[in-house]
Structures are given as structure tokens and as C-alpha cells.
Image (cartoon, rainbow, N blue to C red):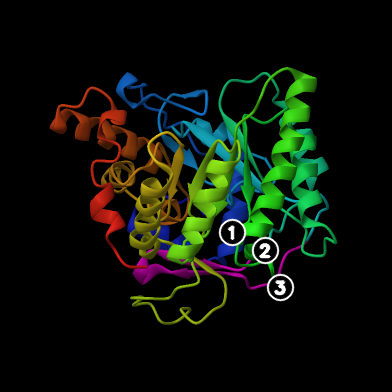
């Protein structure tokens, strides 16, 4: 799904089925055809979140490198961290094809992949092979569609990947696994967090280091739903929230060809909703709990606005389909320019400066 930024090259790439293009991009990164785009580190962009020192706040979101095939190649594009997965205990094929749709007029994507991945063992083998390598690589864990005990699937993810992960993301917000988002309900979330964090504590005691655990939530929660998530996040030893996954909303789309397809919408149209939810959650959890802003980030201005709305870190994926592999480096240079413009000594100085603006928006 990476492509050069020229219109001609993008048009040629977009003649391919989206899933085929995605596979080609993974192959290109594996082969080294995509050159390193890393920019010199700007110390003003470095942030420490949940005890981890990130060289910059920009990360590759889960969903691209589902099977942990190219995390180091992604880091060479300039990302400060990469998140692999979502990984489920057993391999699963996901939903029927076609299941990815480009809405080029909106710079958006609809997907209903359904946690297609090769399972724990395949990803664990790859991550074990890079053990000791530099770079922050998080593991996004999920539950199998046919699982009789979804909470147990998340616990299994913590236990399997504990020796090789930099951090974990508990993904309960995909709209493409029936019933998964029900785990965001307060009682269900309480039971899930208790089990996952108990497993983390046991593994930390065994290995001698405690890894951060983040919870990834949907942008389609009500105000009351946000209250419940915030309450449970603060009641447990959770290390942060990732806001947000894809949306079921189809508001304000202009590209109607695929707008009616089922699945989660990502890309530029998600920016407003996800940023409003981010700010609302920052108001609820206070200043200390780390938040990761995701949804519609396609420029340095977008990334900075997430930070101003309350994000400590920012992730992207779908906008890279339209902007190509040079996007991370371009965003990082742009963030440095914005710090110059504002006379800020650190990107952390700008966090929360527009929380009230974004939190005032209606969901």
C-alpha cells in the first residue's frame, strides 16, 4: 500500500486490488527496495511515555504489519516506534474477500479484514529473531473470532509475547469481529483488564521487567461509554489508551462508490471524530495517563493537532496509502518546523493546548 507520491505512480498502484497492493508493499520493505527515509533525530521530539524513551512521537499503527514481518524496515522510514498485529492465538483467514476498499476522493479506506493473521507462533518466531535489535516494537493482541473465551485469548497474548515485545496493545475496538466491541462495556472491561494486568504482573515477576499495556478503543463510544472506559482505566494499573480504531460512521463522505460497504472507516474523514474523542478522554483521565492519538494523520499539522488535543504519541497508517513511504520523514521535519515557529523547546510543551476546543465537539 505504500506508493510514490507522484500522481502517475499512485494511479498505477491503485489499479491493483488493495489487498494485493498491501502484499506488494510488505514484499518491497522485506527486499529493501524501499529506501531508508530516516531523518536526523531532533531531541525536541523525544518523549518518554510509560517508562519508554521514544526518539520521536510518530508510530506506525497496527493493521499494516499484521504478522511482524517488517517492523525494522518500518523504523527505517523514520517512525519512532512500530506496532505489529493484531495477532490472535490461532491463525485465522479473516472475512471473505474483497474486504478492503479505497475511497480515494476522501483519502480514506474501509476494511472488514477481521483479524486475518498467521497466529501467535508465526509472529513470535519473527520477533524472537530480532530480539536484541534496537527500536521500539509493540504487539497488538486480539481474540479469535471463534474463541470460547476471549479474555483468555488476550491473556495468552501477554504471556506469549512478553519476552519479545516493547509494549502491548489490547485491541477490543475492531468493528470486524462480531461482539468484540462489547468488551468495552464497563463490567466486561473490568474483567478483561483484571485478567490481562494480572498476567502482566506474573510475567514481570518472572522476567524482571514490567511492560506497558495500552487499551485501544473505538471512536464510536457515547459520552457515557467514554465515562466507563475512563473510570476502568484509572481504576486499574493501565499504562495508557490508544484513541482510536476505525469508525462505523459514514458522515460527510464524497466518494459514494464504496461508502456503503460494511467495515471500519479510516483515513482523513476519521480525523475530526477521533481527535474529539481523544480530547474528551484527556479531560476525563487527567494529565498523567498517556494517550496515543490515531485517526486521519496525514501531515505534520495533523500530528501536532493530535498532540494539542491531548496525545503523548501519534500513530498513522491509512494516510500513508495516499502519501507514500516518505510520509513519516516529512511529518517529522514538519513537526520540527512547527516547534521552530512556536518557539517551543519540546513537543511536550504543546500537549493539551487545544483540549478544550476539541472536547467541546459533539459526538
Q: Which residue, given by chain and number where applicable, does mark 3 sit on?
A: 96
Residue 7 occupies which quadrant of the picture?
Answer: bottom left
Q: Of marks 2 and 1, which one's residue comes earlier in the chain?
A: 1
Q: Which residue, given by chain and number where applicable, does mark 2 sit on?
A: 180
Rendered location of residue 241, percent (x, y) = 51, 45
Q: Of marks 3 and 1, which one's residue comes earlier in the chain?
A: 3
Q: CA distance from mark 2 to mark 3?
A: 18 Å
Q: Of marks 2 and 3, which one's residue comes earlier in the chain?
A: 3
Q: Which residue, given by chain and number where applicable, does mark 1 sit on?
A: 173
Residue at (46, 31) in percent of width and height: 80
Q: Nearer the viewer, residue 199 or 78?
A: 199
Q: Does the magenta segment cover residue 50?
A: no
The quarter in which the C terminus is drawn is bottom left
On the question of residue 319 being in view, the answer is yes
Residue at (69, 26) in percent of width and height: 130
Q: Which residues are magenta?
A: 93-113
Disc 1, SS:
loop
CB within 8 Å, label 2 to label 1: yes
Residue at (71, 73) in percent of width and height: 96
Residue at (60, 32) in percent of width and height: 212
Q: Residues within 10 Å of mark 2 (few under 14, many from 20)?
A: some
Q: Is residue 346 above or below residue 143?
A: above
239 left or right of 3 in image:
right
Q: Residues within 10 Å of mark 1 (few under 14, many from 20)?
A: many
Disc 2, SS:
helix
181 left or right of 260 in image:
right
Disc 3, SS:
loop
Q: CA distance from mark 3 to mark 1?
A: 20 Å
Amino acid at each position: 500500500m505504500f506508493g510514490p507520491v507522484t500522481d502517475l505512480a499512485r494511479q498505477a498502484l491503485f489499479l491493483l486490488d488493495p489487498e494485493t497492493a498491501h502484499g506488494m508493499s510488505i514484499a518491497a520493505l522485506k527486499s529493501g527496495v524501499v529506501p531508508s527515509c530516516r531523518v536526523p533525530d531532533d531531541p525536541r521530539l523525544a518523549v518518554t511515555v510509560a517508562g519508554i524513551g521514544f526518539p520521536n512521537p510518530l508510530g506506525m499503527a497496527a493493521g499494516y504489519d499484521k504478522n511482524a514481518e517488517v517492523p525494522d524496515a518500518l523504523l527505517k522510514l523514520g517512525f519512532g516506534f512500530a506496532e505489529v498485529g493484531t495477532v490472535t492465538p490461532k491463525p485465522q483467514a479473516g472475512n471473505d474477500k474483497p474486504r478492503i476498499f479505497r475511497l480515494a476522493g476522501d483519502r480514506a479506506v474501509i476494511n472488514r479484514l477481521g483479524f486475518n493473521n498467521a497466529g501467535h507462533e508465526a509472529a513470535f518466531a519473527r520477533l524472537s529473531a530480532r530480539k536484541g535489535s534496537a527500536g521500539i516494537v509493540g504487539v497488538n493482541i486480539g481474540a479469535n473470532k471463534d474463541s470460547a473465551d476471549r479474555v483468555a485469548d488476550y491473556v495468552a497474548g501477554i504471556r506469549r509475547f512478553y519476552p519479545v515485545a516493547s509494549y502491548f496493545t489490547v485491541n477490543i475496538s475492531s468493528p470486524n469481529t462480531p461482539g468484540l466491541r462489547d468488551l468495552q462495556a464497563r463490567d466486561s472491561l473490568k474483567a478483561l483488564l483484571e485478567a490481562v494486568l494480572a498476567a502482566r504482573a506474573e510475567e514481570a515477576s518472572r522476567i524482571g521487567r514490567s511492560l506497558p499495556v495500552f487499551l485501544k478503543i473505538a471512536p464510536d463510544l457515547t459520552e457515557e461509554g467514554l465515562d466507563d472506559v475512563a473510570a476502568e482505566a484509572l481504576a486499574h494499573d493501565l499504562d495508557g489508551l490508544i484513541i482510536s480504531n476505525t469508525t462505523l460512521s459514514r458522515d460527510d463522505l464524497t466518494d459514494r462508490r464504496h461508502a456503503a460497504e460494511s467495515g471500519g472507516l479510516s483515513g482523513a474523514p476519521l480525523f475530526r471524530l477521533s481527535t474529539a474523542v481523544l480530547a474528551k478522554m484527556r479531560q476525563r483521565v487527567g494529565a498523567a495517563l498517556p494517550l496515543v492519538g490515531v485517526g486521519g494523520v496525514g501531515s505534520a499539522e495533523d500530528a501536532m493537532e493530535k498532540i494539542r488535543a491531548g496525545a503523548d504519541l501519534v500513530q498513522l497508517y491509512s494516510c500513508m496509502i495516499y502519501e507514500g513511504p516518505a510520509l513519516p520523514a516529512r511529518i517529522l521535519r514538519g513537526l520540527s518546523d512547527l516547534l521552530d515557529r512556536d518557539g517551543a523547546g519540546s513537543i511536550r510543551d504543546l500537549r493539551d493546548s487545544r483540549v478544550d476546543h476539541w472536547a467541546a465537539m459533539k459526538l
